[in-house]
Every structure is written in C-alpha cells, then in structure tokens.
Amino acid sequence: MSESQSAPRPASLFRRLAALFYDTLLLMALWFVAVALVLPLNHGQAFAPHNPLLTTYLFFVAFLFYAWFWMHGGQTMGMRAWKLQLRSLRPGPPSVWQLMLRFLVAIPAAALFGLGYLWILFDRRRLSWHDRYSETTIVQLQHNPMRYRRKD
C-alpha cells in the first residue's frame, strides 16, 4: 500500500486541542448571535444568571454547530485549519447518534480537568473518552503537495 493510500494516523492531542480552541472562538461568536436573536423574547433585558432555558438553548446551539460540521465533511472550521477529520470506527460515516454521544461525553471529558482528552496520551489507539464511547476518532489528514502546485 502506498503512502497516499495508507490509513490516516490518529490526530495528536496538541492538534485536537488547537482545533478545539479555534472552534471555541467560533462557537462563542455564534452564541452572541444566538442570544441576540432571543433577547427580544426577554423584552430586551439581560437574562438572569444560570437561566435554565438560556443554558439549554445554548447547549442545543453548540450541538447543532458541531453536528452540522461533522455531518458535512467531518470537519469543523478548526479541524480544517489543523487538517483533522472526524471518522467513524464503524463502516460508513458517523451517525447522528454517534455525534450526539460524542458531544455529550466530550463535556465531562473536558470538565474533569481534561482527563478525557489526556487519555489520548495513554491509549494504545490514541482515542479519547468521547472517541471510545461514540466509536469515532479524529484523524490527521495527509498534506498533498501536488494539490498546491501551479500549472504553467
């Protein structure tokens, strides 16, 4: 099997966290827009801290942000920048159920001092908690130098 046809390698922890940082910036911008859209429903007043309706709404906005990108090419904007892609460990593309499980398990994986992400450093297959639970993985895409050559 040639190098271009070989299976992609699992993404490193650094690249995953870098992509997550990019995506967090985009998600925060999206949250600003999402809150601005529902602000008229609160008579233009600021929402009370820890408002359960607002928290639930932002949770769904975040899930839709990630799920939409993962379902359309397997890459968020941050993943594109770092040449990463979400893949299913099962045959075929990831299902909506796998994406939901991935998203839900990623929250405690990050909230517990990042232990779910740090697991990559000890796992033989370099899978995080949310990779394992959802049967998905993040792979490093290969750079194709021919793609960027000018044709004269």
Image (cartoon, rainbow, N blue to C red):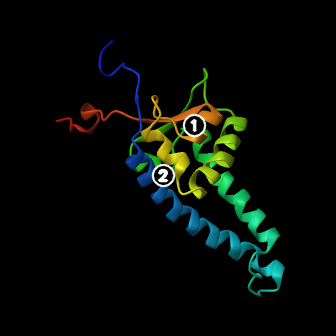
Name the element at disc 2: helix
Residue at image location 71% in from the left, 60% down from the top: 59
Structural distance between the alpha carbons of marks 2 and 1: 19 Å
Q: Residues within 10 Å of mark 1 (few under 14, many from 20)?
A: many
Comparing 73 with 105, the one in front is 105
On the image, which quarter does residue 65 sit in? bottom right
Q: Is residue 149 above or below residue 50?
A: above
Q: Which residue is mark 2?
A: 77
Sequence-wise, the earlier of marks 2 and 1 is 2
**In screen coordinates, is 143 left or right of 109?**
left
Q: Is residue 121 above or below residue 21?
A: above
Residue at image location 62% in from the left, 39% down from the top: 71
Q: Residues within 10 Å of mark 2 (few under 14, many from 20)?
A: some
Residue 131 is tagged as 1
Residue at image location 82% in from the left, 81% down from the top: 42
Instruction: From the top left corner, tell me how far across and down residue 5 is, in percent.
Output: 36, 19
Image quarter of the N terminus: top left
Image quarter of the C terminus: top left
Instruction: From the top left corner, tell me how far across and down residue 56 is, in percent.
Output: 77, 63
Choose mark 2 or mark 1, whichever is in front. Answer: 1
Give the amino acid at mark 2: Met
Name the element at disc 1: helix
